[in-house]
Image (spheres, rainbow, N blue to C red):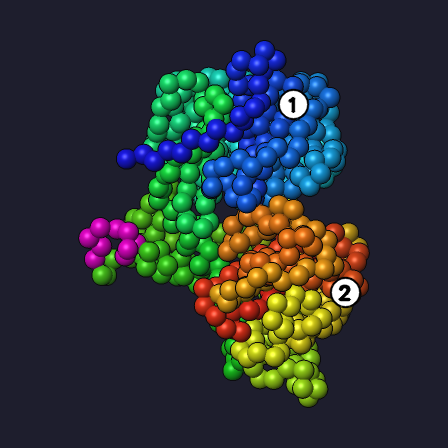
Amino acid sequence: MKRIIRLVVFCGVLLAGGSAYAQIKDFVVNPAGSSIATMYDDHIDIHSFVDGDMYKFQIEKKIQSIRPASRPLTIIYSSDSKYLIVSGINKEIYVFDTKQYELQFSLHGQSAATEMDMSPKEYFIAAATGNTVDIWNVDTKTIQRQLSLEAAANGVAFSSDGSLLAVTTQNNKVIIYNTVNWEVAHTYDAEGSVAAPAFNAEDKYLALVINDKTIAILDFCKKLIVQQHTEQKKVNTCNFYHNVSNSTTYVGWDRNESIIFMITKLEPSYTKMVNQTVNQAMNDWLKKREDESPEDYANRVNDETMGRQRELFRQEFSTAIAGAVVADKKPDEIYRLNECDEFVLSDGIPAPPPEEDNFVPLAIVQIANEAEDNLKAAAEEVIKRNKASKLITDKTEIRVGTEVMADVDAEGNKILNYQVNYKYVVFANGEDYPPGGYNVKKSNAAMSLMTIVKQTLESEDFVKHLSAGKRVKIAIIGSADGAPIRGKIPYDGSYGAFEREPYYHNGKLNNITITKASGITTNPQLAYIRTASVRDWLSDNVATLQKTRNDYQSHIEVSEEKGGEFRKIEVQFTIIDAFK
């Protein structure tokens, strides 16, 4: 039985004659779930959701109206919700921020873009212009590549990891490109017109509008429609939405003056599950053990054994998941996943060589291992000094670590990113924030961590990777326990006002509001403002970060349990293309 929710968005938005609702030409929900942008013939309206929560399915108020210099043709949000992007009939692409909805920059194309999408890493904007898709490089603001098609494009969408671009065309085709080399990875011939592609969060399925009225979910590797729903009137657009609070996935589409949300259940991407676990296991396996001599480490970890160990992990984790998925699996059967995310007996697939895309040279691994040893030594020195000063005790645990990760830049070149992790956990009261406290300077444990961050990022091991202009992603993870906040904790506004501010809650994009007037009334707000304090301290005190291009993200984890061990701060620095 289908569960469908109808959201009437625009009571009071009338046509000139005042007798009918204005027709929605396009709509897009802010990925943080705080608002919805809807496009009409000559303007775009942005409405907020009640409590900044789209899954209450109630519109609160109109917060902004944008009238571009020319008639808008299509609108999109960036995946991190920082930008609203509008294509105009005058061949311009306008990029607005989502705080004040002010124009940041524009791109002038050769033709007007009728469909668009921005890649998750903000490398590209794909703009459909007739029988061509222009791939704009956002950094250089130039067209980097043009994809030629047999028929006009009527839809474009990047996958959530940016590795794929789906294009629908007016000759009923779905074409999926690999964005590293821009070669065709998958195709699908629809039975009728097809438009409005959208990947699900795990990039295993595409939502499509087929024959103008049917919303279909396609397993594009298997070329199989797994779910569909047909409307009576024309549908313009559709997309996937995921509610973090109850792990529910919806497909949403337009219906005249309304937006429809339908709950859908899909199989997860087992390949992504396995790859994530393999990468974590390999990162641990590559580290030198405490009791391991240099000779023993060299024998255990080398170019040959790295590839073999990765495949052993892949086989082990695939077989473990298959045990819960494959019917009548025998205890001695070993499984692998094929290219379409299906479990198959490993006897039927020869073991592949190490994947070049994920390959990190052993020499780089050894550099990271040496830096991690120095990082741990520096941390131990700070901990020892602060214990002697009675700032912290053995009840404060500080952990540091490094990881090198393979990636690809906007030009398709393989790069190596360097992640440096700092984390503390407090197992007793008195060493962390005072009750209701959020200033990082008031927590002995947090300041111990900040001292380690400053000392190590300004050391020789990392200064060479943090040259001027180097791009650094800084994720600050603030955690809170389940102890309820009674009443309201005053907020003095030290770190600014936050209105529908994007952040990540348990790994999923969300939004939050904290002002001097509202104060702090929930644990997520308290955890968030602690991340804001950490960001402020890092910006003011770490010299190497004052010359790099920093992209800060706030992540919140809230436990149902109570206790100091659930209140912690973690900071992850990812230096992009660190070894260049």
Magenta span covers which residues?
322-330
Q: Give yes or no for residue 329 being in the magenta stretch.
A: yes
- What's the amino acid at mark 1? His
User: What is the x, y in percent for residue 153?
Assistant: 54, 21
Q: Is residue 370 visible?
A: no
Of badges 1 and 2, the one in the foreground is: 1
Q: Nearer the viewer, residue 81 or 48?
A: 48
Q: Which residue is mark 2?
A: 542
Q: Which residue is mark 1?
A: 43
Q: Residue furthest bottom?
A: 388
Number of other residues with Cα within 10 Å of mark 1, as a class: few under 14, some 14 to 19, many 20 or more = some
- What's the amino acid at mark 2? Val
The reply, left or right, for residue 154 in relation to residue 311 is right
Q: Nearer the viewer, residue 492 or 64?
A: 492
**Helix, strand or loop at disc 2?**
loop
Which quadrant of the figure contains the N terminus?
A: top left
User: What is the x, y in percent for residue 247?
Assistant: 41, 49
Determine the residue positioned at 64% across, 59% down: 529
| Alpha carbon distance from label 1 to label 2 | 44 Å
